[in-house]
Amino acid sequence: MDISSTKALFLDRDGVINHDYGYVSQKKDFDFIDGIFHLARSATDKGYLICVITNQAGIGRGYYSVEDFQSLTDWMCGQFKEKKSEIAEVYYSPYHPIHGIGHYKKDDFSRKPNPGMLLQAQRELGIDLSKSIFIGDKLTDMDAGIAAGIGKNILLTADDELACKEKNYFCVPTLKHSEIYF
């Protein structure tokens, strides 16, 4: 594949891939959002790499370990693979500027709304960010995507779509609605 044409679908985890119950760290609490596997297969079929971009302050706060996160991530990636859509890479930021413990207490460049994880993916995977899409459920996701130069940023929200038209991102009520932007 010509590296200059590599495009990615970046997905936030909690709130886009799975329901956000707050600091999800175990399989028993990980409920996939309707449509995520169909969306991932559609993106894969259209030549997008799939990358997960997720703040994981629960690590920094001491709620769960890096090993717990990695175990859940391995399982999640396995679920995607079973559904015929592989995740190329998962990028995470364990830091929190106020509530982090020890070396995790900082506003690291990797933590959204900073674009660090997206820029890391660009370097490591040779992604053309201008041809890529980022789907998130928080304004910090949109801020990170815009700062990184992502071509299309999509906010998964129940808010009025018209309010988003004045912004530098699109708003959709469900994952299925985001497919029109591919």
Image: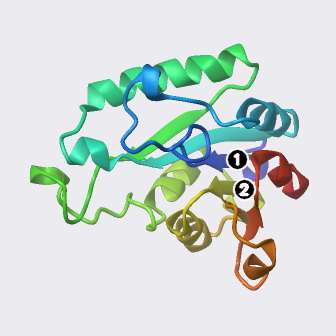
User: Which residue is found at the position 25% from the left and 33% from the top?
Assistant: 64
Quadrant of the frame with the N terminus: top right
What separation in Å lies between label 1 and label 2 (alpha carbons)?
5 Å
> CB of mark 1 within 8 Å of CB of mark 2?
yes
Residue 3 position, x and y percent, is 72, 46
Q: Between residues 20 and 45, which one lies in front from this camera angle? A: 20
Q: Is residue 153 left or right of residue 114?
A: right
Q: Earlier in the sequence, mark 1 or mark 2?
A: 1
Residue 104 position, x and y percent, is 19, 52
User: Label 1: which residue?
Assistant: 9
- Relative to 54, say whether 64 is above or below: above
Residue lying at the far left of the rendered structure: 102
Residue lying at the far bottom of the rendered structure: 166
- Relative to 4, say whether 108 is above or below: below
| Mark seen at residue 133 | 2
What amino acid does circle 1 point to? Leu
What amino acid does circle 2 point to? Ile
Residue 31 position, x and y percent, is 56, 29
Which secondary structure, mark 2?
strand
